[in-house]
Image: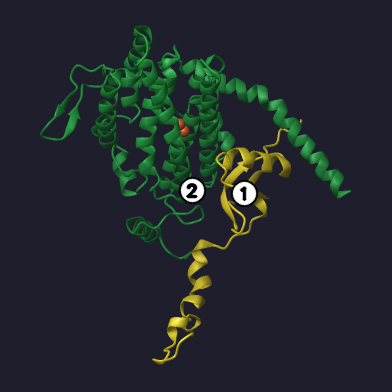
Chain colours: A yellow, B green
Amino acid sequence: MSNKEWPLWEVFIRSKQGLNHKHVGSLRAADSKMAVENARDVYTRRSEGISIWVVESNNVFASDPSEADSLFEPADSKAYRHPLFYDVPDGISHM
Amino acid sequence: MKDLNIQELERRFQEKIDNDIKIEPRDWMPEEYRQTLIRQISQHAHSEIVGMLPEGNWITRAPNLRRKAVLLAKVQDEAGHGLYLYSAVETLGADREQTIDDLHTGKAKYSSIFNYPTTSWADMGAIGWLVDGAAIMNQVPLCRCSYGPYARAMVRVCKEESFHQRQGFEIISLLAQGTPEQKEMAQDALNRFWWPALMMFGPNDAESPNTLQSMKWKIKRLTNDELRQQFVDVTVPQAHMIGLTIPDKDLKFNEETGHYDFGVIDWAEFWEVVKGNGPCNKERVDARRKAKEDGQWVRDAAMAYAEKRKIQKAS
Ligand SMILES: [Fe+2]
Ligand SMILES: [Fe+2]
């Protein structure tokens, strides 16, 4: 008897060929095979997916929301990364 | 961020809520917001799971294969709803098994409607039509709830609920158009489930002290009485359409307000059922507890097998 709780798994579903796997939620399962089978029953009862990824939740490392400002600010201040930053003279096309 | 005082954190939190910015699991949130959500979402999860029992009761006795397949799919959906919600509750740092044990010890509640017995096949119609119908009324505004994981779970749930209501309405309207005995079965089911369905929205607003805070946090978007009125307004014409009578002699369309006025709910009965004294409270919780206890060896065996395989792989 192990009497341990089944680990938590995060579930990612590819809804159709050509799209990314997207996080849909989590579930409990003893191992990865059971996690995939349970994910099929819990998250794809209406053909929501054609491919499933499961990742044990304690293997997910996340950024800290309270550090979001300092983490993402460098991107906000660089308007020159966007095409609208530049003036294209009249008469120039295909650019 | 660490040096912000609690008032400033609370101010920023409320500002996000007021601007309709969703709260996600790792964001700072007031402890009462977290506790309110843990309580509400786990009780919602329990309702989905306990709700499988009164309908599961009829799967083996469905009148034909089509009805059986449909009921099976519906009950399986309810299991899924419970699992989406337990998943959401875990994002708040709550222990899934602990919330389930709270159900089994009577500490946590679930929707009082599931403490009524299902004595005839017509009840499968009444439940889909009225109980899932009332659940939809409750759940649609929850899709806009301020807590991201709960709102997303509700979007999935609501997509699935509409088939639940339609299959129930199909059952009851077919019976209502059948032989006099069948029509009587349909009317009897409506008579027994109408008032408990109205009670599903909870106490009157005046008796619901937590509503105000929940609305301020945008967990709740409409009050109990507003939702109940919506439900009555859409359901009464459906009953008339299929020739059934709502068991309320005070029910009357009010030309001035544009809504149906309806009779007084028996709140004494409601509180008795909430307290655990409804017709099936004991049976329902016993069934859940037994399911968990009887399944313990299976869960243990699966875990032991997984651990053994992990060791074998490593060596
Ligand atoms: Fe449900
Ligand atoms: Fe349902």
The quadrant in which residue B21 appears is: bottom left
Give the class, few, some or many, for how many residues have Cα within 10 Å of label 2's Cα (few <14, many ≥20): many
Q: Residue A75 placed where, x, y %?
A: 50, 76
Outermost right residue: B315
In the image: residue B75, left or right of residue B242: right
Q: Residue B224 placed where, x, y %?
A: 29, 35
Question: How far apart in space, not on screen, are marks 2 and 1 (Cα)?
Answer: 13 Å
- Asked whether the residues under the numbered discs 2 and 1 touch, taking CB atoms below 8 Å apart as contact, a structural biologist would say no
The residue drawn where x is 33% and y is 17% is B190
Name the amino acid, label 2. Answer: Pro
Name the amino acid, label 1. Answer: Glu
Q: Is residue B298 above or below residue B149?
A: above
The residue drawn where x is 59% and y is 34% is B97
- Same chain for mark 2 and mark 1? The answer is no
Q: Secondary structure at mark 1?
A: strand
Q: Residue A7 placed where, x, y %?
A: 67, 42
Q: Which mark is residue B149?
A: 2
Q: Is residue A45 above or below residue B113?
A: below
Q: Is residue A63 above or below residue B303?
A: below
Ligand 2 rendered quadrant: top left
Ligand 1 neighbours mark 2 (CB distance < 8 Å): no
The quadrant in which residue B121 appears is: top left
In the image: residue B276, left or right of residue A40: left
Q: Secondary structure at mark 2?
A: helix
Give the number of marks.
2
Give the class, few, some or many, for how many residues have Cα within 10 Å of label 1's Cα (few <14, many ≥20): many
Q: Which mark is residue B132?
A: none
Give B210 or B202, whichever is nearer the viewer. B202
Q: Chain of mark 2?
A: B
Q: Which residue is mark 1?
A: A10
